[in-house]
Amino acid sequence: MFVTNMESVPAMKIVKHHGMVTGSTVRARNIFVDIGQWIKGLFGGELKGYSRLLADVRAQAVERMAMQAGELGANAVINVRFATSTISLGAAEIYAYGTAVEVRSEEYGAGEEYGE
């Protein structure tokens, strides 16, 4: 599955459009991570616990989006974007969305690809 924030996949031609696909996850903060990050914030620097959490959450949202695209028959998701929102105190949603498409290598003509 190709996943990109570009409008196309390089060296590939879009042959079918499947529509918008989404993936999201809601995560609550962990009190132990919060305490550690609060102390770290007093001294400055990267809050690595939160950075790891966000990376994991983004990956899960993209995985869910790609799974939805695969169920539609797509082999790529283009124009991928992310959004976030606060759901409640201490919980946030990461939302990934893009356009599911089917792509083929540009080196084959459309007629050749389908045996014409």
Image: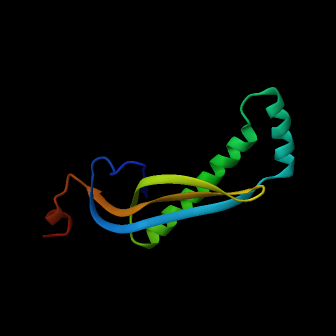
| Residue at the image position 86 percent from the left and 51 percent from the top | 31
| Residue at the image position 48 percent from the left and 52 percent from the top | 81
Quarter of the figure that contains the N terminus = bottom left
Residue 50, percent from left and from top: 72, 43
In the orientation shown, which residue stands out farthest toward the bottom? 72
Q: Quadrant of residue 42?
A: top right
Residue 9, percent from left and from top: 34, 50
* In-front residue for pair 44/55: 44
Vertical placement of residue 81 versus 71, above or below: above
| Residue at the image position 12 percent from the left and 70 percent from the top | 116
| Residue at the image position 82 percent from the left and 27 percent from the top | 43
* In-front residue for pair 96/59: 96
The answer to whether residue 100 is left or right of residue 57 is: left
* In-front residue for pair 104/86: 86
Residue 18, percent from left and from top: 36, 69
Vertical placement of residue 38 versus 15, above or below: above
The answer to whether residue 11 is left or right of residue 31 is: left
Vertical placement of residue 65 versus 48, above or below: below
Residue 62, percent from left and from top: 54, 57
Q: What colour scheme does the image use? A: rainbow
Number of marks in the rendered image: 0
